[in-house]
Amino acid sequence: MARNKIALIGAGQIGGTLALLAGMKALGDIVLFDVAEGVPEGKALDLAELTPVEGFDAAYAGASSYDAIAGADVVIVTAGVARKPGMSRDDLLAINLKVMEQVGAGVRKYAPDAFVICITNPLDAMVWALQRSSGLPPEKVVGMAGVLDSARLRYFLAEEFGVSVEDVTAFVMGGHGDTMVPLVRYSTVGGIPVPDLIRMGWTSEERIAAIVQRTRDGGAEIVNLLKSGSAFYAPAASAIAMAESYLRDKKRVLPVAALLDGEYGLRDIYVGVPAVIGARGVERIVEVELDRSERAMFDRSVAAVEGLVEACLKIAPGL
Ligand code: TXD
């Protein structure tokens, strides 16, 4: 059986890490695409030279023309400008919207059957723009944010309880931004919901509230430490988990930005929700019950995403 083809649009910090992880996990052959001269070729060659050491067979290629992505099974998009300290995700909107229009046209022409994962910020608006400009079916175009946000929450909870990260599940919904909705009630340690652990005296309401806030600020915490650029290891690993679930038809239940069609009473908007990811892309959106305060948080998050989409439509009314 021929190997799958994975196209990475954007060969920056996340793109390079995606290329490494996709190779190490034997997901397929990899094409790195970027507009920065020499960068995709340089990274591809460096990675190809790693394959004998690590002992896996994957072809790496670098490119700056879209025909190189022809027939890709998965396309992961990080192209654009990353956040700098003091810059909000929304400041990126205008620049990255233009980039999504270019990427969408390239994907439409050369990889119309691909499963497309957008990572570029502001995430929920960019994945919406990418779906519009590529014209691919909505179930084949998703955004990565929830896997990362819930990984951060899982890590902080594991640290708090002194237990393995493997046994902690966490649940984050809504848009990727300051209004994300971490759902403590649906987060567990070894199957025990966090509110029960509070009652059992493992932690306190206050400490959990602080962890939730740290999760919300997770991106900014890293931006402030790095000074230039934003997080890239965990974001790359998160997108690879989504790609793997698609390519291997694992049907994992992952929080992804998906286009809603009536779920949660919403339509035509991309927002983070739990979904089953399998060979058909988004195979099912899980509609969990939200209590009144959770729903209020979710609505606030949705309103923030709607604001971004409106801003996109002002810049590019044709979308
Ligand atoms: O959870 C999430 N979704 C995120 C999102 C978590 C972390 C970072 N997130 C966002 O991912 C971040 O705000 C950025 O918008 C993207 C990519 O982050 P990365 O750290 O990889 O940024 P880099 O290193 O600046 O890489 C971007 C590359 C760079 O090499 C540019 O030359 C290239 O994108 N670029 C383009 N490639 C192709 N086509 C066009 N037009 C283009 N413009 C820039």
Image (cartoon, grey):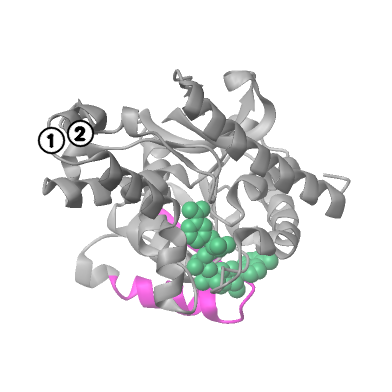
Relative to residue 171, is residue 130 depicted above or below? Answer: below
Residue type at mark 2 is Ile
Which image quarter is the N terminus in? top left
Q: Residue at x 61, y 45 (%)?
A: 124
Q: Looking at the rendering, in which quadrant would you find the C terminus?
A: top right
| Residue 312 left/right relative to 203 | right
Residue 73 is one of the magenta-drawn residues: no
Q: Secondary structure at mark 1?
A: loop
Residue 64 pos. (x, y %): 63, 70
Q: Which residue is mark 2?
A: 198
Judging by the rendered image, the residue that carries numbered circle 1 is 201
Looking at the image, do the residues carrying marks 2 and 1 touch, with CB atoms under 8 Å apart? yes
Categorize mark 1 by other alpha carbons within 10 Å: few (<14), some (14-19), many (20+).
few
What's the amino acid at mark 1?
Gly
Image x and y of residue 234, in percent: 36, 58
What residue is shown at x 74% (from left), y 52% (from top)? 105
State which region is magenta.
Answer: 28-50
Can you give x and y, in whole percent of width and height, for residue 225 in the image?
39, 75
Circle 2 SS class: helix
Q: Is residue 258 left or right of residue 42?
A: right
